Amino acid sequence: MADNYTKGRIYELDLGTLRPDPAQARKYIDPASLAELTASIGKYGVLQPILFRQDEAGAPIFIVAGERRVEAGRAAGLTTIPGILVTGNHREIALVENLLRENLTPVEEAEALDAIMTEQGYNQSQLSEMIGKSQPIISQTLSINKLPADLRDQVRSNPNVPKTFLMDCAKLKTEQAMRTKLTKFLDKLNNPAIRPIRVSQAVALMNRVDSLQGELANLAWQDWTDGEKQDLSDRLRNLQQGADALLQALGPASQLA
């Protein structure tokens, strides 16, 4: 028998009834990150409700966003978890939630963006508006899908392969060149005798800027207090001044279209 749920309300859901969404973009959960979340939930409980949906018959319950919280809750010995019913385009909701909060691997992100564009008939500009990332970033991320499927499978669950590296691989003209570049990288990454490959400071900063841009674009500030709005405004102005000063210092290269 189907349960009746109301959109927007928080419910205590039986963990035994929850199922992964077949359309979920996330296929890999980092064990170390999951262990940390399990310890946190064991100590503090689940602080952020998951998002869930039902099928046309009203059951079963599918996880739209929060699969890590569900797995960690089970590992921590919980029997229930707070959840909010969502309706509408659950694929979009799950994608935005994962991009802003749960860090899909680069391959998962690229494939999820492509799936949304195909299903909804979006162009890159529309997709950019939906998730709050610039169109050039969308284009660069989608380029990862140019890699052969078996190469994407090799790195799909590896969070240590930088997104920028995969985009560079995808720019190569031949499949053999892509394979050679990726194989050499993975050999170095998997060889403990070789110094670990580190993401450069520039790339790390750009990734944080991308994440912040998406978070700001989807910020639900309408219910904030006047004081909170003012504090955020002050910080954004300071950030804008710092960005303007940096753009000027970077010179002509920063002004290229």
Image (cartoon, rainbow, N blue to C red):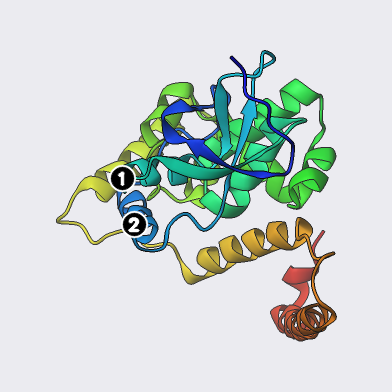
- Residue in the image at 75% along x and 30% along y: 89
Q: In which quarter of the image is residue 7?
A: top right
Callout 1: 10 Å neighbours few (<14), some, many (20+)? few
Q: Residue 181 carries which label?
A: none
- Residue in the image at 37% along x and 50% along y: 160
- Residue position for label 1: 77
Instruction: From the top left corner, tell me how far across and down residue 240 is, in percent.
Output: 79, 80
Q: In the rendered image of this protein, does residue 55 appear above or below residue 191?
A: above
- Residue in the image at 75% along x and 78% along y: 247
- Residue in the image at 82% along x and 80% along y: 233
Q: Is residue 170 something one can see in this rendering?
A: no
Q: In this view, does 167 lie to the left or right of 177?
A: right
Judging depth in this view, the residue of 145 and 86 nearest the camera is: 86
Q: Is residue 53 something one can see in this rendering?
A: yes
Amino acid under label 1?
Gly
Q: In which quarter of the image is residue 64?
A: top right
Work out which quarter of the rendered image holds the C terminus and state it.
bottom right
Q: Which mark is residue 42?
A: 2
Judging depth in this view, the residue of 168 and 234 nearest the camera is: 234
Q: In the rendered image of this protein, does residue 150 appear above or below residue 216?
A: above
Amino acid under label 2?
Gly
Q: In this view, does 181 lie to the left or right of 228?
A: left
Q: What SS does tag 1 mark?
A: loop
Work out which quarter of the rendered image holds the N terminus and state it.
top right
Q: In this view, does 126 lie to the left or right of 213?
A: right
Q: Is the Cβ of the residue at disc 1 closer than 8 Å to that at disc 2? A: yes
Callout 2: 10 Å neighbours few (<14), some, many (20+)? some
